[in-house]
Amino acid sequence: MSREGWTERAYADSGAYLTHRAYVVTRLGPPLEAGDLLLDLACGDGAFAEYLPCGVRYLGVDGSAEMAGAARSRGHDVVVADLNEYVPSEQVAVTTCFRAIYYARDRRLLFRHVAAYTEKKFVFDLNPRQYDLEPVIVDLRASGFARVEVRPFFSPQRVALPSPVASGLRTLEGVGPVARLLLRKRFTYICAAARQ
């Protein structure tokens, strides 16, 4: 099966989802700035690169040669490698890993591995119905990430929402009790782990 157009098939509204993801990645934890190199683990077809702020450099990593080929056809720099083992040729400012933290063979080892080459922050999503947040934070701190920030992320992947509804959900991300209630049924957290 062709991997071309994977993002457009995987998300009901890829533009809204990836725009919001880029907004959160840019601002949660130390800010993402022009000139920073972002390493996107399990990048798929690399479409996330198209939503990053101007001047942010992008490098994707994916275990699938077909996905990497699709990303290259979109004009992105992508390496075929296992996220548990890949080491970039230079330090990166930010490492991201979305919809893929479960590929870690050993979560704490992956966090240590990422910490070794990441200067500013490691940003990933976490399903609270699949993973308890507290042990993940403990693993991050044990891996060298002294500062951990977490926020709800209410952008659906499989449903396109009318703009006012999507905007309302984004507002609810900052409303603690309501956000916790919604997270019991759906949606994810985004975690940003920084070395200091």
Image (cartoon, grey):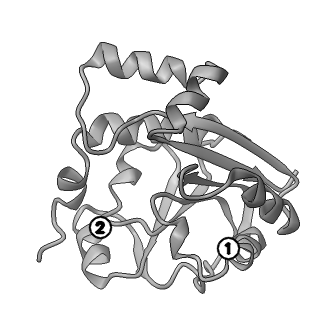
Viewer-closest of 157 and 127 = 127
Q: Secondary structure at mark 2?
A: helix
Residue 157 falls in image quadrant:
top left
Task: Check disc 2: other Cα within 10 Å, few if <14, some if 14-19, many if 20+.
Answer: many
Residue 39 relative to residue 13: left or right: right
Q: Which mark is residue 151?
A: none
Viewer-closest of 79 and 64 = 64
* Residue at 46% over, 39% down: 185
Task: Check disc 1: other Cα within 10 Å, few if <14, some if 14-19, many if 20+.
Answer: some
* Residue at 69% over, 41% down: 150
- Residue 75 shows up from this direction: yes
Residue type at the position of mark 1: Arg
- Residue 53 shows up from this direction: no
* Residue at 44% over, 40% down: 186
- Would you say the residues marked 1 and 2 are in contact, meaning their CB atoms lie under 8 Å apart? no
Q: Position of residue 74 (x, y in %)?
A: 25, 61
* Residue at 74% over, 74% down: 108
How far apart are the alpha carbons under marks 1 and 2? 26 Å
Residue tagged by mark 2? 71
Q: Secondary structure at mark 1?
A: helix
Residue 175 relative to residue 142: left or right: left
Residue 110 relative to residue 195: left or right: left
Q: Which mark is residue 107?
A: 1
Mark 1 / mark 2, whichever is N-terminal: 2
Q: Position of residue 98 (x, y in %)?
A: 48, 57
Residue 160 relative to residue 125: left or right: left
